[in-house]
Image (tube, rainbow, N blue to C red):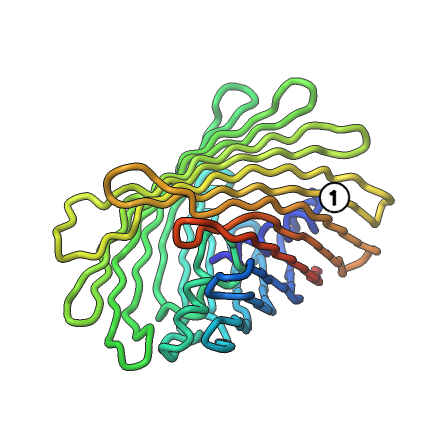
């Protein structure tokens, strides 16, 4: 889930390379505002979402970690048909990680509890469609998916004296649920993932990380036995960190491609092919032992298309921002982020401008 990814990144920033204790508890919460305003003539004037994420993590010695993450969110959209809204709790993820072989093998089990909203009114579908657009990256793209279970295993190994590699795999089972009131049950297909990674130091004090992730899903069975199929997805990711004076410059790039579904018959609804390219940079600079300032910039570009033929531009955006991390000492740390996206979104053969301010305030407590 995106909020788990967001809080994981925040946790890494707040940790600031501090050693992890053998036993300890960490709690995080705050407020995240995502909003987008679109040019005149677009079906949606603006979308605003508030998310209150909550995560709790506890380490039971060097081998076991229990994590819990959930959120409350509310989203509204001003459209040509009036203002639409949806809100409530999201699903809750409970993750147990076991270091079966310290430093080499990790086994994880995630239970997704169906605490979120599933059967929404049909009037809220346009709001959920906007939240689920990958280009816009809302913190809470969905409120509930009926629950499920994910199991995975990963291992790491040396590559020479200074580099390391890793491989991992997981499988997720989804429970059936009713996504829209009076629409009938949806039975999502299972999803398998495999990940390969490599990392190691570069000359001049730099460090490189790279990964490739492939995911494949079974068909989703919807009302009246019809099916929706999604092609395999391939994600390529790389990141480099370099010393920059008193700070650190981090650069990243990723490319996520969604392929045409294989073996799909004419009765199945095929999810369009797609390609998302992302680039970013971050300059971490300590202003004092307790205060760190980091200007950031992210660029995102998305293409979509039919099963055959070329892909067309869905939209692009550039998102500059500032992160401020304050750790006065003791158990508390504060992260404040301010960002604004500027770009364009396709609209009936043309395009409209978009402006998307984002604000994040998160508090962490650890002992």
Q: Residue at x 24, y 66 (%)?
A: 187
Indicate left or right for 251 with 284 as reference. left
Where in the figure is residue 184, as x and y percent of width and height? 24, 76
Question: Percent from the top left, x then y, of residue 290?
Answer: 83, 49
Q: Choose between 346 and 94: the one closer to the eye.
A: 346
Query: Which of these two is toward me, 310 or 104?
Result: 310
Question: What residue lies at 78% left-to-right and 45% top-to-bottom?
Answer: 293
Q: Can residue 88 be seen in the rendering of this structure? A: no
What crowding class fits label 1: few (fewer than 14 Cα within 10 Å), some (14-19), or many (20 or more)? many
Q: Is residue 201 left or right of residue 349?
A: right
User: What residue is rendered at 57% in x and 67% in y?
Assistant: 49
Q: Quadrant of residue 358?
A: bottom right
- Above-or-below relation of 351 to 26: above
* Relative side of 220 to 99, left or right: left
Residue at (62% x, 33% y) in the render: 251
Q: Considering depth in this image, is 216 or 135 the residue closer to the camera?
A: 135
What residue did someone put label 1 on?
Answer: 294
Which one is nearer the viewer's eye here, 236 or 329? 236
């Amino acid at each position: 889930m995106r909020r788990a990814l967001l809080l994981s990144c925040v946790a890494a920033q707040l940790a600031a390379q501090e050693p992890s204790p053998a036993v300890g508890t960490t709690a995080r919460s705050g407020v995240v505002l995502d909003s987008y305003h679109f040019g005149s003539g677009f079906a949606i004037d603006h979308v605003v979402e508030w998310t209150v994420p909550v995560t709790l993590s506890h380490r039971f010695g060097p081998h076991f970690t229990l994590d819990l993450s959930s959120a409350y969110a509310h989203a509204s959209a001003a459209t040509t048909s009036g203002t639409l809204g949806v809100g409530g709790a999201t699903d809750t993820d409970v993750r147990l990680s076991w270091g079966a072989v310290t430093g080499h093998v990790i086994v994880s089990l995630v239970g997704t509890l169906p605490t979120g909203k599933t059967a929404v009114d049909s009037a809220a579908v346009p709001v959920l469609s906007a939240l689920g657009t990958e280009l816009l990256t809302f913190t809470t793209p969905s409120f509930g998916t009926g629950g499920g279970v994910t199991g995975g295993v990963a291992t790491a190994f040396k590559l020479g004296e200074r580099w390391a590699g890793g491989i991992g795999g997981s499988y997720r089972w989804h429970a059936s649920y009713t996504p829209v009131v009076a629409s009938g049950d949806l039975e999502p297909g299972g999803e398998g993932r495999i990940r390969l990674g490599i990392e190691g130091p570069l000359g001049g004090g730099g460090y490189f990380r790279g990964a490739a992730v492939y995911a494949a899903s079974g068909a989703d069975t919807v009302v009246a036995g019809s099916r929706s199929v999604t092609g395999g997805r391939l994600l390529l990711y790389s990141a480099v960190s370099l010393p920059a004076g008193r700070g650190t410059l981090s650069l990243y790039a990723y490319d996520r491609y969604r392929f045409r579904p294989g073996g799909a018959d004419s009765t199945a609804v095929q999810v369009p092919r797609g390609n998302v390219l992302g680039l970013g940079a971050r300059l971490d600079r300590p202003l004092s032992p307790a205060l760190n300032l980091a200007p950031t910039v992210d660029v995102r570009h998305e293409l979509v298309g039919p099963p055959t033929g070329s892909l067309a531009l869905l939209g692009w955006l550039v998102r500059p921002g500032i992160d401020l991390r304050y750790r006065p000492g003791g158990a508390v740390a504060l992260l404040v982020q301010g960002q604004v996206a500027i770009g364009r979104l396709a609209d009936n053969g043309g395009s409209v401008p978009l402006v998307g301010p984002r604000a994040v305030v998160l508090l962490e407590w650890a002992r």
